[in-house]
Amino acid sequence: MPHSPTSQRKQRDRAKLWQDPDLAGIDILHAHYFTHSFSRHTHDGFAISIIEGGVGAFWYQGSVHASPAGYLGLLNPGEPHTGQVLSEAGWKYRALYVAPTVLQHVATEIADRSWSNCWFPEPIVYDPQLAQTMRTLHQLLSETSSRLERETVLLSVLAQVLTRQAQNAPHVKHLEQEHWAVKQVREYIEAHYASNISLQQLAQLVDLNPFHLAQVFCTTVGLPPHTYLNQVRVHQAKRLILAGEAIAQAAYLTGFFDQSHLTRRFKQILGCTPGQLLNH
């Protein structure tokens, strides 16, 4: 029986490749392939992917590897490989293409010393915790989110990839509590919540590297820096709305991209939308 027009539309290959202007050295791919087959090729950087659906297979380092849903792909720079669909459900995945200098920089921050030996021994791994963090990052990269949020979650993903899966993984340096630094960063966020704050900016403020700052902030406050920023913004927006400010204007004044961005974060933190707040 021939496929219906609707079924045919669903079977078309779909792919989107882009860069985030705030995340240098990173290419992002969301793809769902049904018929596409990759010829043998290499990447200049590391290819880190999460398989979301279907099954694919690829030739890599002399062997064929299956990549089913729920698994992660970790391919090293300069290694020839192929890629093809193996299931009727296609092959759906999200990938980061990471410049070697970016991963080396993260490894150096983790170990707090120069680190250049970044390499992944296994091209396909099952790591549910890392997979969930990858999904969170890709969701952020697909929607409106703050620069601080994207940078912090990307750093967390790359740090987990290195410490959990890399050969000769860098060991996390023992972190002091740095209460003074956390206090200064909190005060800065509370004073500049409407600005496009970056993790690097906060780290420079207290003379810590970004990984160290993100770790000690979360340990001390119980929230990562970007979540604390979202919380401050939401409470400031609530104050403005209750004082009579229009919701869209409150979003603008507190650093959100638009009203929908405010509404999403507002409900996550307060359990209702700005409109529902006004209806009480």
Image (cartoon, rainbow, N blue to C red):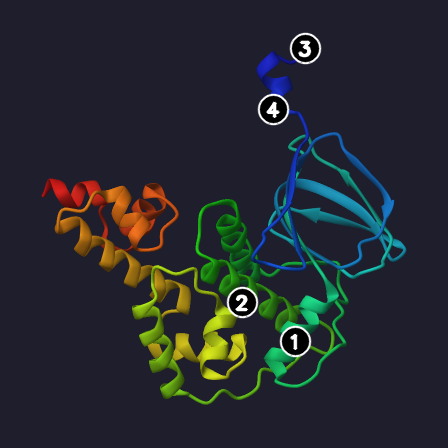
Q: Which mark is residue 2?
A: 3
Q: Is residue 260 left or right of residue 94?
A: left
Nearer to us: label 2 or label 4: 2
- SS label for mark 3: loop
Q: Is residue 228 left or right of residue 134?
A: left
Q: Earlier in the sequence, mark 3 or mark 2?
A: 3
Task: Name the amino acid type tagged 2.
Answer: Ser
User: What is the spatial separation of the Cα atoms under label 3 and label 1, in whole angstroms?
Assistant: 53 Å
Q: Quadrant of the C terminus?
A: top left
Task: Name the amino acid type tagged 4.
Answer: Lys
Q: Which residue is mark 1?
A: 107
Q: Which mark is residue 156?
A: 2
Crowdedness near tag 4: few (<14), some (14–19) or many (≥20) residues, C-alpha within 10 Å: few
- SS label for mark 2: helix
Task: Name the amino acid type tagged 1.
Answer: Ala
Q: Earlier in the sequence, mark 2 or mark 1?
A: 1
- SS label for mark 4: helix
Q: Is residue 71 left or right of residue 66?
A: left
- SS label for mark 1: helix
For the point 29% across and 63% down, which residue is it? 232
Front in this rendered view, residue 121 or 259: 259
